[in-house]
Amino acid sequence: MLRAGSGYADGQLTIKPQPDSLEDNGRPTSIKVRPGRRTATPPAYSPGYASRRRTAHAGSASRGVIELWEVADEQRRRWEYAPHQTVGPLAFGITADEVVDALHAIRNLDHSDRAQYGPTVSQPGCFAEFPDVGVTTYFAHGSLLAGVAIDALRGPQVTIDGVPLTGRTPSVLDKWIVDHTGTNDLDLRYTHEGNPASIALGLVMRVQRAGDLVLSRPLLLTPEWVEDCWDRLPDHEWRTF
């Protein structure tokens, strides 16, 4: 588990992991947590996220820098998704340390913009980005995994019952989720963005820009987070376009 140390100043709290947590394989030994304030309406653009994507890699540094809008279909990992259970190597309910161990990569762990003064990693709203993998993970209840967002451009190709969910034409997946939920008598709802979602599937089918196109960005969540995704997910996710 990650535990907060002292030294909260200038709007930042340094979280220091236990000696056996994140120090192996040259991984970071401290993680920055930034408090902030949630806005009434999420901004449509995140300059920091866009700039990070300019230098994001797909799986290995040896593959070189990928252009901002390039879709890395040929380089995607292949992950299976079992609703409410696992997304590739990640299992819902594991700790942040266990996520790091599973993915063998970490870039930063930020606190939700909803955070108040003196946040701790155990508060809801934390997230961790893994640009080399194309994944963002969201945590709640003592830093336990509650959601996984898959980058549309270079995240792993996640499949459910053989159906690929990542980087596809949104209308194709809209039709699939409507047909699948109808055939199997599952719930279907729509988010504030107008994207289809299902608690039974643990799925919110968001979209993400790829140049002049938009592609599917699957958001895989626990049932409670699907039902209340607007309030539970930090602004970081809604600013990702």
Image (cartoon, helix red, strand yellow):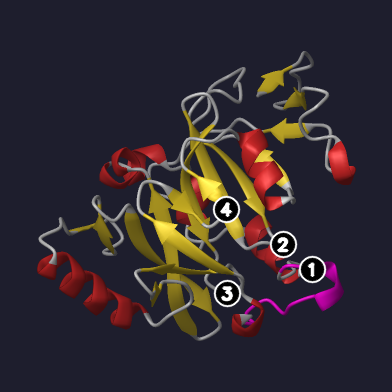
**Disc 3 packing (10 Å; few <14; some 14–19; many ≥20):** many
- SS for tag 3? loop
Lower position in the chain sequence, tag 1 or tag 4: 1
The residue that label 4 is drawn on is 89
Residue type at tag 3: Leu
Residue 224 as seen in the image, left or right of residue 16: left
Residues at circles 4 and 3 in contact by the CB criterion of under 8 Å: no
| Residue 78 in picture, x, y percent from top left | 56, 70
| Residue 236 in picture, x, y percent from top left | 53, 49
Given this view, does label 4 or label 2 mark the residue nearer the observer? 4
- SS for tag 1? loop
| Mark 1 vs mark 4, CA separation in Å | 18 Å
Residues at circles 1 and 2 in contact by the CB criterion of under 8 Å: yes
Lower position in the chain sequence, tag 1 or tag 3: 1
Residues at circles 1 and 4 in contact by the CB criterion of under 8 Å: no
- SS for tag 2? loop
- Between 223 and 55, the one lying in front of the other is 223
| Residue 20 in picture, x, y percent from top left | 80, 27
Give the answer, above or below, for where 69 lies relative to 59. below
Lower position in the chain sequence, tag 4 or tag 2: 4
The residue that label 1 is drawn on is 60
Visible residue check, residue 125: no
Residues at circles 4 and 2 in contact by the CB criterion of under 8 Å: no
The quarter of the displayed image where residue 29 is located? top right
Given this view, does label 1 or label 4 mark the residue nearer the observer? 4
| Mark 1 vs mark 3, CA separation in Å | 15 Å
Lower position in the chain sequence, tag 2 or tag 3: 2
The residue that label 3 is drawn on is 153
**Disc 1 packing (10 Å; few <14; some 14–19; many ≥20):** few
Visible residue check, residue 127: yes
| Mark 1 vs mark 2, CA separation in Å | 7 Å
